[in-house]
Image: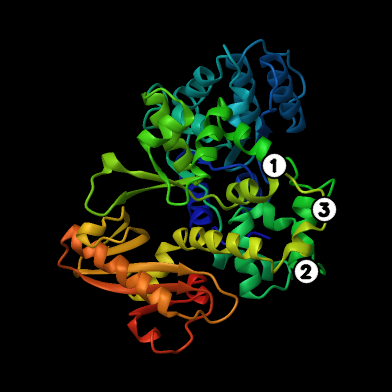
Amino acid sequence: MLVAREKEKNILMSAMNEEESRFIAIYGRRRIGKTYLIREVFDGKFTFQHAGYAGGSTKEQLFAFCVSLREYGYQDFDMPSNWLEAFELLKILIRSSKDDRKLIFIDELSWMDTKGSDLMVALEGFWNSWASARKDILLIVCGSATTWMLDKVIHNKGGLYNRLSYHIHLQAFSLKECEEYLMANNIMMNRHQILECYMIMGGVPYYWSLLQKGLSLPQNIDKIFFERDAVLRDEFKYLYSSLFTHPEKYIDIVTALGTKKAGMTREELLAATQSENSGTFTNRLENLENCGFIRRYTEFGKNSKNSVYQLIDNYTLFYFKFLANRPTDEHFWENQTGTPRIHAWCGLAFERVCLEHIDQIKMALGISGVLTEVNGWSCRNDIEKGIHGSQIDLLLVRKDQVINLCEMKYSKDDYTVTGKTDKEIRNKINDFMTLTKTKYAIHPTIVTTYGLTQNSYAGNIQAVITADDLFR
């Protein structure tokens, strides 16, 4: 059953019903549901469907393509020696089809583009010289290798430049969409459990599909990640290699970021990864950002040249914390639940979930329609100037001259603003106002799981956002 994806579904159905040929490219990280989306929307009714083979040679890719041609009814032909010939065979299959709308779906296109092959030349010729001149073709190509899809298809500067009708970047599910997915599959979890699961898995639909009815959340996590034959035992190894050429370079970056909660500047990352300052390094950062592994933010009062990069991918953070040095206990999560180690991780993971749901936070604050910049900010202590040293992960800087200074606080119950917490927030406000000289009003804002315990300090908080608000 297809859950959410309404915007993407509307694009696909609209293209299917148009009276001109259309070319759509869909990209997104591994396990995000690209193939599932296409198959569900069109109910598997393709004029032709093919998927590339991971690691296959040109000869093997061509052989597989021919197998797909035969599966869709074209039997009598000689084996092509290159992609130009292969796409000529596809034309013959399409011409013979009685479908009113010829739906052509080529999955994992990047895997078909082996070294020295003429795949892109053939694809360009197929679309530009033939398919686009007809009125009855819907061509959809997909790929998990996001960098390849962006370079070779989405931002193609050659024969496919400006030829796409639509491109779809398939994103991770939000908390609300994960809740809808569980309900559709009759898996019962309360919102706190969904939140904890999201802190581990993020919004990757395939990961959520592995949850089993009848098991508690800790039992499910052990079964998926910690058992000897766990389904996602080696996921980290395949995740980055499926998306990027030279995945080790990307892993170096996220590994470095995994050691710094607040993130790192480009210069700090160059030093930490011993990388050359080049356009290639810039591309790697952009690719990681496009895939949702990292976020880039600008500190208040600084320009984009001083951007900070922060690891935000839930699964990667979980991997570094608990799976990189895998425990031998196959019931690790069940046995560790409630321990200080898990509670400390929950605090950091909850912050990341909040940063993935800024639109929902703005909605809860009633500022969805207000032009807002999303910043962070930090400073070092300077006793002589009365500066305590602060790290602020989220500032919502509003055009109405208000800044929401957001503190993300995970709790299994109502969060209690203690005298210590109140002082820390006041110190941050003092540091920020002293050093930035801002004239904006500062609204201390708490984002927490359930709400605040009402005490003498709670009244100093201007706004409270709860986990329920993140499910909007």
**Of helix, strand and loop, which one carries label 3?**
loop
Q: As rendered, which of 299 and 274 lies closer to the eye? A: 274
Q: Residue at x 59, y 43 (%)?
A: 100
Alpha-carbon span between mark 1 and mark 2 = 22 Å
Alpha-carbon span between mark 3 and mark 2 = 17 Å
Q: Residue 101: x percent and y percent?
A: 57, 42
The residue where tag 1 is placed is 235
Q: Residue at x 62, y 12 (%)?
A: 82
- In the displayed structure image, the side of residue 73 where residue 32 appears, left or right: left
Q: As rendered, which of 433 and 136 lies closer to the eye? A: 433
Q: As rendered, which of 436 and 278 lies closer to the eye? A: 436
- In the displayed structure image, the side of residue 263 where residue 12 appears, left or right: right
Amino acid on which disc 1 is placed: Glu
Q: Residue at x 77, y 23 (%)?
A: 75
Mark 1 or mark 2: whose residue is earlier in sequence:
2
Q: Residue 228: x percent and y percent?
A: 85, 46
| Location of residue 108 by image quarter | top right
The residue where tag 2 is placed is 216
Q: Residue 171: x percent and y percent?
A: 52, 51
Q: Residue 143: x percent and y percent?
A: 57, 36
Mark 3 or mark 2: whose residue is earlier in sequence:
2
Amino acid on which disc 3 is placed: Asp
Alpha-carbon span between mark 1 and mark 3 = 19 Å
| Location of residue 88 by image quarter | top right
**Of helix, strand and loop, which one carries label 1?**
helix
